[in-house]
Image (cartoon, grey):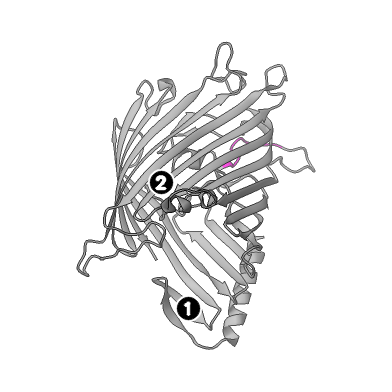
């Protein structure tokens, strides 16, 4: 599927470009773009992220982390189609080398189609690019519950103030990839997750109410996914900010459903975001006696606030009003976020156990505060400084056994074009 899509995109762009006039290299949206005429473009995109980190107490993590290195193409093929191809060029990419690889038909605002590999329509923060998030790391729920990228097709559009996205996908997102070794009878395929179905609806609901003008820009959203998960240690799991497991996978079999709600309000230089998510996974026949167990639950939420003290507008593509070397200091933003993630079973009566086949799972929670200062001296460079305070409810499953609380300091250099 990838080879077919890449070949189609390459042929379409080259064929259209060969017949077009007014060719040349320009700067479109402050990024290098090759123009083959009025409606045919090839935008060159690149992202680089490098982290420096310190921990108290010390944990088994590297001080320096080459977080992201990507290169890609993005543009239009006539006014009817757009495309994106992005590849991770770091040697040890976490979820494979290819990121977004898709073609979209965009003739009408009310009805559009996208096909290829891209992020499933679930999660406000998860669907925000890594160099555009307010903090260095996404919230716990955005990495543990939200599905992330997958191969599939989606219809989407805008109906007035209402936006919608509905799609079908091969699996259930890169964040939920199966890890247990699986076996199949000769002649049969390996059991996998999916297909999965996902949908999201968003809207500016306050515009219908007699509220102050600034509140009318607040955006709300609801999202849902549904997939079948094969038998095995295939549940979602709990990971700390820096990737340590505080709740390992349990045995599941049956339906996995996610429900999410989001809120996004950016009046002027300030921003307020919040999300809530829950994943519910069936455990049919997963007891030691082949009996059904109560559903496995992953639940969490976050709320964050940000403020550009230099006055930039959060609703726009952020460009420093007074860049460095042009009479100013660049753009400076302050931010704070609280988030938490809890994993447990629907059954809460009786004695709790950590055994992956226990009906009553011993719950565990990760609660995190993130304090941030971001500095954008020029359009293409951002320096993110975060202080992260993380606590675990069950100290026996914390990164350092018996230690509940952790501080981390992080400085990230981002270069984006």
Residue that label 1 marks: 34
Number of marks: 2
Crowdedness near tag 1: few (<14), some (14–19) or many (≥20) residues, C-alpha within 10 Å:
some
The question of residue 243 being in magenta is answered with: no
Q: CA distance from mark 1 to mark 2?
A: 37 Å
In the rendered view, tell whether residue 213 sits above or below residue 75. Answer: above
Q: Residue at x 68, y 17 (%)?
A: 288
- Measuring from the top left, give residue 78's x and y in whole percent: 60, 77
Residue 272 marker: 2
Q: Nearer the viewer, residue 234 or 103?
A: 103
288 left or right, relative to 40: right
- Name which quarter of the figure residue 33 lies in: bottom left
Q: Nearer the viewer, residue 29 or 184?
A: 29
- Measuring from the top left, give residue 107's x and y in whole percent: 64, 70
| Residue farthest toward the right in the current orientation of the protein | 187
The disc, 1 or 2, on the residue closer to the chain's N-terminal end is 1
- Name which quarter of the figure residue 83 lies in: bottom right
| Residue farthest toward the left in the current orientation of the protein | 327
- Measuring from the top left, give residue 255's x and y in whole percent: 69, 35
Q: Nearer the viewer, residue 270 or 16?
A: 270
Q: Residue at x 64, y 31 (%)?
A: 281
- Measuring from the top left, give residue 136's x and y in whole percent: 37, 47
In the rendered view, tell whether residue 369 sits above or below residue 166. Answer: above
| Residue farthest toward the bottom in the current orientation of the protein | 21
Q: Residue at x 50, y 88 (%)?
A: 22
Discs 1/2, front: 2
């Amino acid at each position: 599927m990838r080879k077919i899509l890449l070949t189609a995109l390459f042929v379409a762009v080259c064929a259209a470009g060969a017949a077009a006039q007014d060719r040349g290299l320009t700067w479109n949206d402050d990024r290098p773009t090759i123009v083959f005429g009025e409606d045919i473009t090839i935008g060159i995109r690149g992202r680089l992220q490098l982290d420096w980190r310190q921990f108290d107490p010390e944990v088994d993590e590297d001080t320096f982390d080459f977080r992201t290195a990507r290169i890609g193409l993005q543009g239009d093929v006539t006014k009817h189609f757009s495309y994106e191809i992005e590849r991770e060029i770091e040697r040890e990419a976490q979820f494979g080398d290819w990121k977004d690889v898709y073609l979209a038909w965009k003739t009408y605002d009310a009805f559009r189609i996208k096909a290829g590999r891209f992020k499933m329509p679930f999660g406000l923060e998860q669907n925000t690019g890594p160099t555009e998030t307010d903090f260095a790391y996404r919230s716990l729920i955005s990495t543990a519950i939200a599905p992330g990228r997958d191969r599939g097709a989606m219809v989407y559009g805008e109906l007035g103030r209402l936006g919608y996205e509905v799609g079908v996908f091969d699996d259930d997102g890169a964040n939920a990839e199966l890890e247990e070794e699986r076996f199949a009878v000769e002649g049969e395929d390996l059991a996998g997750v999916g297909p999965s179905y996902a949908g999201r609806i968003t809207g500016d609901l306050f515009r219908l109410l007699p509220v102050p003008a600034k509140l009318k820009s607040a955006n709300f959203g609801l999202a849902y996914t549904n997939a079948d998960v094969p038998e095995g240690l295939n549940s979602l799991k709990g990971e700390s900010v820096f990737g340590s497991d505080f709740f390992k996978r349990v045995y599941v079999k049956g339906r996995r459903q996610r429900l999410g709600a989001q809120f996004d309000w950016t009046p002027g230089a300030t921003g307020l975001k919040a999300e809530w998510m829950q994943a519910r996974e069936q455990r049919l026949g997963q007891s030691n006696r082949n009996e059904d167990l109560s559903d496995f639950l992953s639940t969490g939420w976050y709320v964050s606030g940000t403020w550009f003290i230099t006055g930039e507008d959060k609703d726009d593509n952020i460009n420093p009003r007074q860049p460095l070397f042009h009479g100013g200091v660049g753009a400076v933003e302050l931010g704070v976020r609280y988030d938490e993630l809890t994993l447990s079973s629907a059954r809460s009566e009786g004695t709790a156990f950590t055994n992956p086949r226990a009906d009553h799972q011993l719950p565990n929670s990760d609660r995190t505060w993130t304090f941030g200062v971001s500095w954008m001296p020029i359009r293409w460079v951002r320096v993110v400084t975060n202080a992260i305070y993380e606590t675990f409810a069950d100290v026996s499953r914390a990164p350092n056994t018996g230690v509940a609380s952790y501080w981390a300091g992080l400085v990230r250099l981002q270069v984006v074009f």
